Amino acid sequence: MPSDGPQNIELIDWLTLKKWSEREKLPITDFPKTFRDAADAIDKRGPMEWCTDRVNVMFIRTAGRFEDSIVALRQSGLNVRRVLISEDTFVSLYGNFQGCLNHLLSNNAVGPEVEYAHIVDFADYLELSASSCDPDRNYTRTEIDSVATLQMFDIRDQIIGSDPEVADVLNFMFDVGFTAGRNFSAVQNIVTLEPSALAAQETRQKNIAKGRKSGSADRRFERLRVFMDEVEAVYDKNNDLREYEDMVLRVAFNNAIPPGEYGHGQFNHYCVALRSEQPFKARFDRLFRNSLE
């Protein structure tokens, strides 16, 4: 997003959980099968988004250098990765759109061409070069690491230039290494953040248990019960939707808590509750988890 300061290399419009849950979303009724199905749907109706309790994936179309492709934004906690999805390699890499979605929902998604471009843009903005340095400049840690990344890109290009016949293999190996580095960087952050997050989650569960007797907790429990009933009804009546967990949840939620009613903006919150809180978790797992065993 353009600004007067250093560019946001993630290029993400960060949302609070409250803003995320309040965004208006429409269920996907025609699940795409091919790259062209997905691209046309995005061009017509806007970004497509899948949300789970582990990861969110959004498919967007952009103008400029990637306008013929689809860019997937994969957000898991504070870890965001962008994966370029190209039409010419779509079938060989994924087979169909379901295969593409499964790949992105996993933690092994590879395709960092967008991130390469943004790193180069970021370095250009800071007037950095892989081949020269200013002895009078006091480089920051960010600038030093950016220069090192540019130098790695140059090494890759030199090796590929010396043996063009293996360019595809070398590019893929570089992509895998880059993605592995991204994952390791995320792990380093999680190591410091996860204990506090788990402690907060445990405290929240205790508070929920203590609040069962309150009127607010009773109303929440009743909304969850109605939501779970609708999930089972939608699952039983729609054979074609059963394999698409998020689609079943969205249709059921709109039936249980229609737009405009109190609680409708908390879709993600209620989905997490069904997946993690008893007695609903057992009913939920019977529908969606046993089929994976």
Image: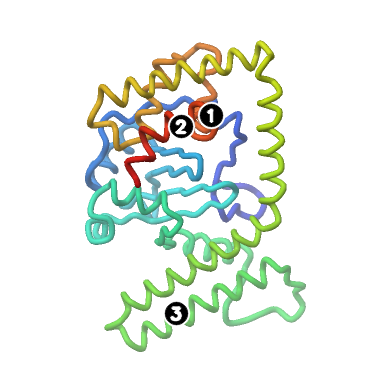
The answer to whether 74 is drawn above or below residue 93 in the figure is: above
Is there a contact, CB below 8 Å, between mark 1 and mark 2? yes
- Viewer-proximal residue, 29 or 5? 29
Crowding around mark 1 (Cα neighbors within 10 Å: few <14, some 14 to 19, many 20+) is: few
The answer to whether 52 is drawn above or below residue 213 in the figure is: below
- Viewer-proximal residue, 221 or 147? 221
Crowding around mark 2 (Cα neighbors within 10 Å: few <14, some 14 to 19, many 20+) is: some
The single residue placed furthest to the bottom in the displayed view is: 162
Q: Position of residue 245 (x, y in %)?
A: 36, 35
Name the residue beneath numbered marker 1.
Answer: 278
Residue at 66% over, 80% down: 133
Q: Position of residue 194 (x, y in %)?
A: 66, 51
Mark 1: which amino acid? Gln
Name the residue beneath numbered marker 2.
Answer: 282
The answer to whether 169 is drawn above or below residue 88 in the figure is: below
Give the image quarter of residue 287.
Answer: top left
Mark 2: which amino acid? Ala
Horizontal side, residue 246 vs residue 44: left or right: right
Residue at 27% over, 83% down: 165
Mark 3 vs mark 2, foreground winner is: 2
Mark 3: which amino acid? Arg
